[in-house]
Image (cartoon, rainbow, N blue to C red):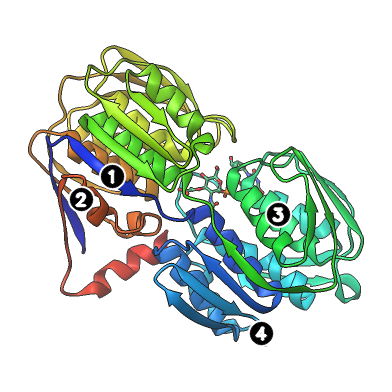
């Protein structure tokens, strides 16, 4: 199995360029299925989740051409449903956005239940509720999802989501784009990538208003046309480097960011004693003094992101005093704590609450990435620890971080990737996520 080996204790210095947002890309690529014409998408992160989604589109007949490493042309002029995608759709979470886009494009959908990181139960009842409200007949059995729009086309309606869900907001918004009439979706999520998806769809001819507020109004259109679009930078990738500098100390400038999207993360890091300077499209993060404890509760945007909880909790494990972290989004997102304990962290977890008693030092140890952000947290722990940390199961990390090792090495980190000569041994894990 591939692994990262980190020799800790080095401060980070320099500049790091942030890639395009994973969670925007994994919504926009499936949405491109509805576009009849060439969409040029810039700032696509080079990560395994985007590669898999592009493979799915290609299996459905899309023509995909890379203009450069992060810009591509997707032409979905001649696409069709295909059973060949099922092996891939089972591997990642975002494959469920194909339900919305297939219904929009073909009036029917055929896929599997999605994969994704395991933080307890991850229901998709709100997605299904939305599709049904739009007039889809849904058949979900034995891991397959089949849907068909009554009369061949979805029909706009008013939908109230019972839970603020990023995925359901995106999926219903995609499906409503090509429905007849007007759809109003209430109690929606407001994450930056939801706004990015709406902007992408609007630039291809959709009529979506209100993304970024808690009510989205979609006036359905008959057709989407080609165009070009540049993805926003990744809030969580940026936050991960900010947390890494907070942990190791040093000074790093993150370029290609939208500082406003980072406010919820910056605010907590500042409370912890980290200095942050914002420019128009960069932030500089500096930590020279001691780290101070704080309390955090994760919430939907603009609250503190759950996808930063493991990384910042890891830094709090090295702060003076006791911190209380409450997970407000997922039922079970503390599996990584067992790994951190192997490195000397003192953390007690009770349900959704973690009580972190800061320690003076973490010590290198063999650990595993339990999921994508937990894996990033292990890398941060390794960078801060005394000695050598080996991180296994890095396929999870590579689902979401473009060139993590290369970018960290440029900042002075001592981290290498050791590749398994027999890559087949990683496949079992990739399929289990
Ligand atoms: N929920 C339901 N029913 C649903 C959908 C969600 O009860 O139909 C619940 C979930 O169980 C959870 C809460 O609502 O308790 C929020 O889930 P949400 O739907 O917002 O999460 P998601 O769309 O499955 C996306 C990101 C996650 C991120 C969450 C929250 C993608 C592909 N995934 O997941 O990102 O944690 O939003 O912000 O966009 C990551 O990038 O590491 C990651 C896990």
Disc 2 packing (10 Å; few <14; some 14–19; many ≥20): some
- Quadrant location of the N terminus in the rendered image: bottom left
Q: Position of residue 327 (x, y in %)?
A: 49, 30
Question: Mark 3 or mark 1, which is nearer the start of the sequence?
Answer: 1
Residue 215 left/right relative to 279: right
Alpha-carbon span between mark 1 and mark 2: 8 Å
Disc 3 packing (10 Å; few <14; some 14–19; many ≥20): many
Alpha-carbon span between mark 1 and mark 4: 42 Å
Q: Position of residue 171 (x, y in %)?
A: 69, 57
Q: Residue at 51% of width from left, 65% of height from top?
A: 42
Residue 63 left/right relative to 401: right
Give the vertical position of 103 relative to 13 (above or below): below
Q: Is residue 376 visible?
A: yes
Residue 33: image quadrant is bottom right
Pointer 3 residue:
127
Q: Is residue 123 visible?
A: no
Q: Depth check: 60 or 127 in front?
A: 60
Question: Mark 2 or mark 1, which is nearer the start of the sequence?
Answer: 1
Q: Depth check: 288 or 431 in front?
A: 288
Pointer 1 residue:
15
Q: Secondary structure at mark 4?
A: loop
Disc 4 packing (10 Å; few <14; some 14–19; many ≥20): many
Give the vertical position of 286 relative to 201 (above or below): above
């Amino acid at each position: 199995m591939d692994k990262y080996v980190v020799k800790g204790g080095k401060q980070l210095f320099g500049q790091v360029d942030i890639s395009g947002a994973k969670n925007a890309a994994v919504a926009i690529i499936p949405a491109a299925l509805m576009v009849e014409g060439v969409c040029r998408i810039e700032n696509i992160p080079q990560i395994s989740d985007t590669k898999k989604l592009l493979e799915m589109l290609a299996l459905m007949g899309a023509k995909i051409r890379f203009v450069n490493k992060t810009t591509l042309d997707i032409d979905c002029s001649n696409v069709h449903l295909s059973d060949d995608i099922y092996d891939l759709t089972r591997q990642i979470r975002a494959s469920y956005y194909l339900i919305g886009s297939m219904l929009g494009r073909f009036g029917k959908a055929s896929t599997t239940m999605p994969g994704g990181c395991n933080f307890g139960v991850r229901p998709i009842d709100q997605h299904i509720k939305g599709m049904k409200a739009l007039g889809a007949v849904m058949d979900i059995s034995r891991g397959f999802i089949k849907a068909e729009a009554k009369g061949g086309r979805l029909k706009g309606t008013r939908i109230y989501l019972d839970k603020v869900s990023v995925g359901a907001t995106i999926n219903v918004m995609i499906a409503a784009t090509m429905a007849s009439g007007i759809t109003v979706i209430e109690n929606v999520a407001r994450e930056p990538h939801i706004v990015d998806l709406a902007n992408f769809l609007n630039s291809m001819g959709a009529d979506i208003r209100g993304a970024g507020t808690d009510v989205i109004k979609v006036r359905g259109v008959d057709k989407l046309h080609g165009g070009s679009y540049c993805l926003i930078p990744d809030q969580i990738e940026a936050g991960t480097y900010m947390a890494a500098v907070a942990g190791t100390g040093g000074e790093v400038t993150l370029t290609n960011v939208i500082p406003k999207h980072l406010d919820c993360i910056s605010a907590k890091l500042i409370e912890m004693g980290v200095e942050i300077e914002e420019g128009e499209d960069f932030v500089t993060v500096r930590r020279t003094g001691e780290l101070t404890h704080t309390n955090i509760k994760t919430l939907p945007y603009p609250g503190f992101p759950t996808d930063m909880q493991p990384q910042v909790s890891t830094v709090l494990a090295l702060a003076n005093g006791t911190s209380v972290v409450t997970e407000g989004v997922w039922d079970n997102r503390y599996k990584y704590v067992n790994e951190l304990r192997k490195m000397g962290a003192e953390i007690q977890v009770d349900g959704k609450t973690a009580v972190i008693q800061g320690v003076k030092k973490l010590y290198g140890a063999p650990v595993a990435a339990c999921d994508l952000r937990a894996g990033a947290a292990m890398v941060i722990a390794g960078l801060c620890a005394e000695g050598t940390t080996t991180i296994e199961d890095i396929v999870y990390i590579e689902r979401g971080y473009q060139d993590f090792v290369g970018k960290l090495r440029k900042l002075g980190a001592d981290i290498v990737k050791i590749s398994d000569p027999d890559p087949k041994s990683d496949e079992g894990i990739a399929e289990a996520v």
